[in-house]
Image (cartoon, rainbow, N blue to C red):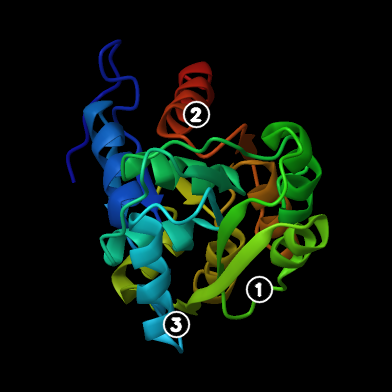
Amino acid sequence: MSLTAPTQAKPLGGLRVLVPRGGPWGDSVASTLRSKGATPVIAPMTNFVPAPDTEDLTSALADLAAGKFDWVTLTSSTTVDVLSAYRATIPSRTRIAAVGETTASALAAIGYKADLTPGEQNTARGLLEAWESATGGVVPLRILTLRSQVAVPVLTDGLKRIGHDVRSVIAYRTVGVPIDQTVIDQVRRGDFTAVLVTSGSVAEEIAAQLGDIPRETFVLALGPRTATDARHAGVRVDATTPDGTVDSIVAALTSTFTSAQ
């Protein structure tokens, strides 16, 4: 395989990067890495299956498009994938709260910007703590909370306790996706320069499918929350980006491999 050499214009020349997430976000990351000289390989390790009550979800998304909610909350990047798959529309008057660095980045990849994200505690509980100051204490607000089938409804219950009018909808359940054995063998041989860890569920699949990643392969976790989840799953983390944006990924890879030359 012929790889480009690093140059000022293409600082990631020679790097082969495993991107374990597909969809608009994965395509965006791969495109940017390619423009910087890297060779990205997209191998999605998780996917979602439809919610058990698809009528409830399609009805909620129709109401969302019609502007019936003041806010919509997204607690994972997979929720964004669901919105994309259902071609959902979020009106400009409806504000968006997102939990997680990769969630906000995935949202940007489909053309939306989060109006509210937690601070240091990038969790549903952290979002609750930031809620009152961000919304000016207005009660009640009409809120749509979209979540996975296995998620504990911390955010939904907390918003209801505050006094908001909350409609909670189960949007999906996450499933692992077996990746091609060729990719697994290449990772185990050390053929990849770097592996991205994009979420806790992806980290679990990396641990299950790839096992111990060779020491010479750089493991980059996207955001502090993902890094914590990865370590709990038994995945080594060599560095952590401040968030899940493409720019932060490029910056981390460029800094690491430019300084190593």
* Vertical relation: 241 (above or below) 81: above
* Vertical relation: 96 (above or below) 201: above
Q: Secondary structure at mark 1?
A: loop
Comes first in the chain, label 3 or label 2: 3
Could you tell me if residue 193 is visible in this image? no
Whether tag 1 and tag 3 are in contact, CB under 8 A, the answer is no
Name the one closer to the observer, 245 or 55: 55
The residue singled out by tag 2 in the image is: 248
Comes first in the chain, label 1 or label 2: 1
* Vertical relation: 190 (above or below) 97: below
Q: Measure the alpha-carbon separation of dots 1 and 3.
A: 13 Å
User: Comparing marks 3 and 2, which lies closer to the viewer?
Assistant: 3
The residue singled out by tag 3 in the image is: 51
Tell me the quarter of the picture where residue 134 sits: top right
User: Comparing marks 1 and 2, which lies closer to the viewer?
Assistant: 1
Could you tell me if residue 201 is visible in this image? yes
* Vertical relation: 241 (above or below) 182: above
Looking at the rendered structure, which numbered label has been put on residue 151? 1
Q: Measure the alpha-carbon separation of dots 1 and 2.
A: 28 Å
Where is residue 131 shown, x and y percent of the image? Answer: 73, 42
Name the one closer to the observer, 39 or 82: 82
Q: Secondary structure at mark 3?
A: loop
Query: At 38% across and 84% down in the image, what residue appears?
Result: 54
Name the one closer to the observer, 71 or 100: 71
Query: At 43% across and 81% down in the image, what residue appears?
Result: 56
Q: Label 2 is placed on what type of residue?
A: Ser
Residue 183 relative to residue 205: left or right:
left
Where is residue 120 shown, x and y percent of the image? Answer: 77, 36
